Amino acid sequence: MKMRKRFVKAFALVCVAIIMLCGCGGPTPVDKSLTVKEKSWHELGSSEKDPVVYQPLCKGDVVYDSAFGVIKVKSVSEETIVLAVDGGFVEPNSDGTINLNIDPLTKIILTPGQSIELASQSMDAGVHVFISY
């Protein structure tokens, strides 16, 4: 009986160690990269941040977070990435202007080699976010 209790305790300890080391079936990372670059502007001028490269990518990764909104990975595979957008971002018009009357984006789908430019729907200050997969 004592031997059985020791075995059960040892077995439980090994199981906990395996779960902690290997995870418990969380998202599988994808070995593609996503590059995010931000350029902000305001009445005094503009500034540009260095690009941030995310690799590997997993579902749930937050790839952009600012006062203008949050962008995170909704799903990712070798063929496509789906980004969930929470905030007031739109694609700028071809002449660079921003449509303040359209609904903001909620989802972006990119395939390898694709990129997108997003702009905040604001008038007094804002950001342009460049995303490449």
Image (spheres, rainbow, N blue to C red):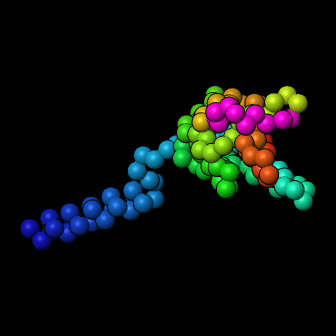
Is 16 displayed left or right of 57 in the figure? Answer: left
Find residue 108 and report its horizontal and vertical position in percent: 64, 33
Q: Residue at x 54, y 43 (%)?
A: 59
Q: Is residue 18 above or below residue 94?
A: below
Q: Residue at x 85, y 28 (%)?
A: 94
Compare residues 47 and 51 and report the one nearer the observer.
47
Find residue 58 and report its horizontal and vertical position in percent: 57, 45
Q: Residue at x 39, y 56 (%)?
A: 19
Q: Residue furthest right?
A: 45
Q: Residue furthest left?
A: 1
Is 116 displayed left or right of 4 in the figure? Answer: right
Q: Is residue 34 magenta?
A: no
- Magenta range: 96-105
Counting labels gives 0
Residue 124 seen: yes
Work out which quarter of the rendered image holds the N terminus and state it: bottom left
Find residue 131 and report its horizontal and vertical position in percent: 74, 40
Q: Is residue 80 above or below residue 87?
A: above
Name the main secondary structure of what is drawn in magenta: loop
Find residue 75 and report its horizontal and vertical position in percent: 55, 37
